[in-house]
Amino acid sequence: MTEFSKGSLVEIFQKGYKGGLKPLTVQVLNLKAIPNNTGKRLRLALCDGLYNANAVIRPESVEKAEAQGIKKGSIVQLLEYKASMISPVKHVLIIDNLQVLGFQEEKINPSPTSVDQYFSNHSGESNEDLLGTSMNSPAPQEPAQKAQSHHQEDAKPKLSAQVTSKPQQTNSSTAKFPNIHAIDQLNPYQNNWTIKARVSYKSDMRKWSNQRGEGQLFNVNLLDETNEIRATAFNDVADKYYDLLQEGKVYYISKARIQPAKPQFSNLTHTYELALDRDTQIIEAEDASDVPSLHFNFVKLNKVQDLDANAIIDVIGVIKVVNPAFQIVAKSTGRPFDRRDIEVVDNTGFAITVGLWNNTALEFDIPVGSVVAFKGAKVQDFGGRSLSLTQSATIITNPDSPEAYQLKAWYDQQGGSNQEFKSLKNEVSSNSGLNTKQDIQSRKTILQAQSEELGKNDKPDYFSIKAYISYIRTENFSYPACASEGCNRKVIQQSDDTWRCEKCDVNHPKPNHRYILTLSVVDHTGQLWVTLFDDQAQQLLGQSAGELIDLKENDMSENNHAFQQVFNRIQMKEFSFRVKASPDSYKGQTRIRYNAVSLAKLDFALEADALADYFEGVKVN
């Protein structure tokens, strides 16, 4: 039976240990990865049987801990660690080495007292010499002989650094602002708090108007080593702070209102956001060295295909292709937009197109072969997976991060520049891939797709079918969408006949109608309900949703004959469909949703050739 080090979590903060501690046996109550430009950390909640405390495993020790299978419920022995106080009321263990001894699902103490709460009730017992010790302080020094043995391993490709790692934190900040909290820990139940954060993004001042009046606002993203949070200022407060808050600078911020985040306006993952008001205090920090420049949570390119459309992610890769800028015109407003598509690759063997807009597209001059990181890219699902930069997205060239060094070495020295890449657009290109012998011969019947339970897994399944359109739902074939470029959110009609998008915070004179068309398709084995979105429905019907609505509203013929004729001409016609099957929860029940991601008319000559090839390979007895 495991003997835990009961009471030790309080003792080490009382005595002010900074090294040379005896091994400490505790249980991991919780565990969370914290990606960072200086490397991934693991944040732990530990319990010694009487008390629980927060702990952080340094980036250089994370791989070893994960290799031992550390998880929630693990029994671990801390071998090298030291006590730290982020503030007088915040105690953290910094771990350099540990050993996983085993696993116990049940908590060793269901309701332990937190170390922070203990010292709050016993003021003066914690050793204030620990105050200001940072989790970014240097790790214990290696012997000189051992350090020399690592010299060759430290040689890395040189990159121009635009995202800097953090030196050791000093004590001056905590002396002036003793109540500093981590952004990750902010919640509405805290009153007396201060954060030290870098402005990682600042928007332009924007005007707004609705039935309640008009005004102005701007927002910033604030970053520390634990997380990122959005802050917004309105009207007079916006005027007060707009010039003070500058992108890239670090500030002490307090007395802002903490409120639930509005995901429709932000690409950040924090549960809450800040509202700056007249009482908010903002002071520029003299020492910014302990706050990271940017916080990344990179997604590998081979994982993008598993994400939902419209997900906001960070990616890093090497620029493979830079296409010329071009101009497109929004169908709904007639407004022109500048765009440029670039292709980015990584060492998973995948390539993805990244769409740049307006000034970013025109001014883009990063050369092919450069490592580039995108923060705040939006996953799109038009003709396959691609990325589009959001308004608040950031592009960083050659960031100073482990991922960038690895990619640069792979591309320049390990053959990455000559590698063949799989495009994420291949899976669902509009017609290509459907009218091929390979696709025809790999088709499934509807019964096969249902029997194999395609779409019940977490990852979507793709398959091809050949089927007739047996019925079309014409009642609700479209929805009114935002007319802003890149935004497809539903808009609501206002009393003044304008259409409001809450995400873009703007009223449009008219919406951009987009298809969401539901069909019943059949083959000789069964029937499926399939949904077509805007691109596929336009291809099938030959006209936009807006044009079809105009036809319906202006059709004076009996029983809307002209409108119905649009659907009648495809009724009981046979097509080849590429179908995406994925699970969908509805009223507490999980069902499979089928979306037609591409379709094509049948090529009968190719169908005959594929059939001949099939029977040629069949051995006749």
Image (spheres, rainbow, N blue to C red):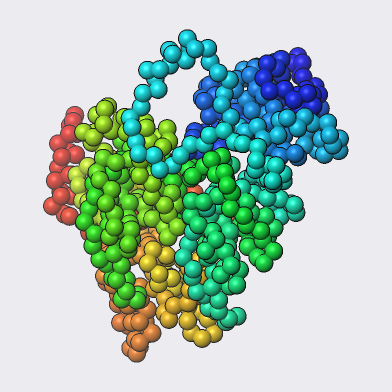
- Pinpoint residue 526: horizontal percent, then vertical percent: 39, 53
Q: Residue 335's x, y, as percent?
A: 32, 74
- Can residue 309 be seen? no
Q: Nearer the viewer, residue 237 or 211?
A: 237
202 to the left or right of 447: right
Question: How far across and how far down the image is residue 425, in percent?
Answer: 29, 49
| Residue 340 percent coordinates (x, y) | 27, 57
Q: Residue furthest right?
A: 122
- Give the number of callouts: 0
Looking at the picture, tell me which residue is in the foreground, 525 or 556: 556
Q: Residue 337's quadrant in the figure?
A: bottom left
User: What is the quadrant of the C terminus in the image?
Assistant: top left
Q: Is residue 100 above or below residue 403?
A: above
Where is the N terminus found, in terms of image quarters?
top right
* Residue 172 in view in this figure: yes
Tell me where residue 255 sits by quadrant. bottom right
Q: Residue furthest bottom?
A: 556
Residue 151 versus residue 241 in the image, above or below: above
Q: Determine the residue positioned at 62% across, 33% down.
A: 134
Instruction: Tell me the residue at 59%/42% (across/down).
Output: 226
- Residue displayed at 62% across by 25% down: 95
Q: Residue at x 55, y 61 (%)?
A: 244
Whether residue 14 is situated above or below residue 357 in the rendered picture: above
